[in-house]
Image (spheres, helix red, strand yellow):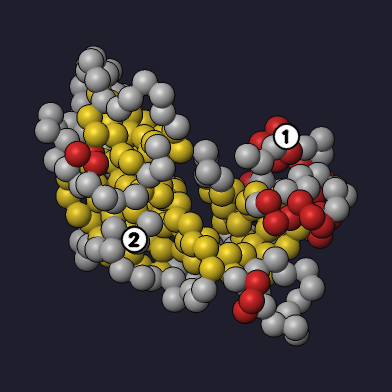
Amino acid sequence: MKSCISIKQVAVSSSFDKIGDDGFVVMVIYNGGKLALWRMGDDKWSSVNDILEGYVYDSVAYSNGKFFAIDVNGLTISIDPAKASFEIMEVAPAEPRSGFGHGDKFKYLVKWFSDLFLIEKYHEDLFYWSESDDEDDYHIKFKIYKMNEEECDWVEMDGLKDAVLFLGDGCSFFVWAKDFAWWKGNCICFLNYLFMGAGGDGPGPKAGIFDFEDGISRKLSKFSSCSKLFWPPPSWLKHYP
């Protein structure tokens, strides 16, 4: 890796895993989707793209003693940081899963307890919006999958049930709705520039909520009961790159 780089996402191994001696390994996505690792004590980074040239990675995560990375086409790989060679294993093939049509798609890997989840976010193309659509709908859709390593595939889920996902480029995490005083589960809270043009009322003018129940993304300010949880708004809610 060069001295001047742009970091998109970082995942860090646990020092309590089988690496030993309190050591740890870092995986990063840098410079437009390249992948690299650094082990504590190494003099330089190891570029995964030297082996898998041409792949553009969207997200990385550390789960159950291994790093996982997914590229823009859905190829999912894993790397065991305990092995000196950083051996690369294909976990799931590159294939379309969402069934979404025209528009921009983004992928996120998020660990919760012992499971690894893939969240696909999709921006519908304005050309395909219907005149009969809900006026509060910002046409940002989500689908969620859980990793099945035995079957080497992602298994689609029908929602989050009683959980809430806070989704971001730098950090994502799940919470139980009842533990967070949230009004309901089965939804995703996220930031997006599309919400900026809808007025600055309420906390987080760039924040919205996607509800799996009706499949609609709305501004956070439309949900008065949960908007109060973010007042005064924390820095991550106020600032969007």
Residue closer to the observer: 80 or 98: 98
Looking at the rendered structure, the kind of residue marked 2 is Gly
Estimate the x, y position of residue 106 in percent, counting from the top left.
Answer: 48, 57
Residue closer to the observer: 11 or 63: 11
The residue sitting at 38% across, 60% down in the picture is 146
Q: Is 157 displayed left or right of 189 in the figure? A: left
Mark 1 or 2 closer to N-term? 2
Estimate the x, y position of residue 185 in percent, counting from the top left.
Answer: 63, 60
Nearer the viewer's eye, disc 1 or disc 2? 2
Quadrant showing the N terminus: top left
Residue closer to the observer: 167 or 161: 167
Task: Estimate the spatial distance between the alpha carbons at disc 1 and disc 2, rounded to whole Å.
Answer: 33 Å
Q: Is residue 155 visible?
A: yes
* Element at label 2: loop
Q: Is residue 17 visible?
A: no
Give the label on residue 54, or none.
none
Residue under pointer 1: 234
The residue sitting at 27% across, 31% down in the picture is 37
The residue sitting at 36% across, 21% down in the picture is 3
Quarter residue 97 falls in: bottom left
Give the label on residue 74, or none.
2
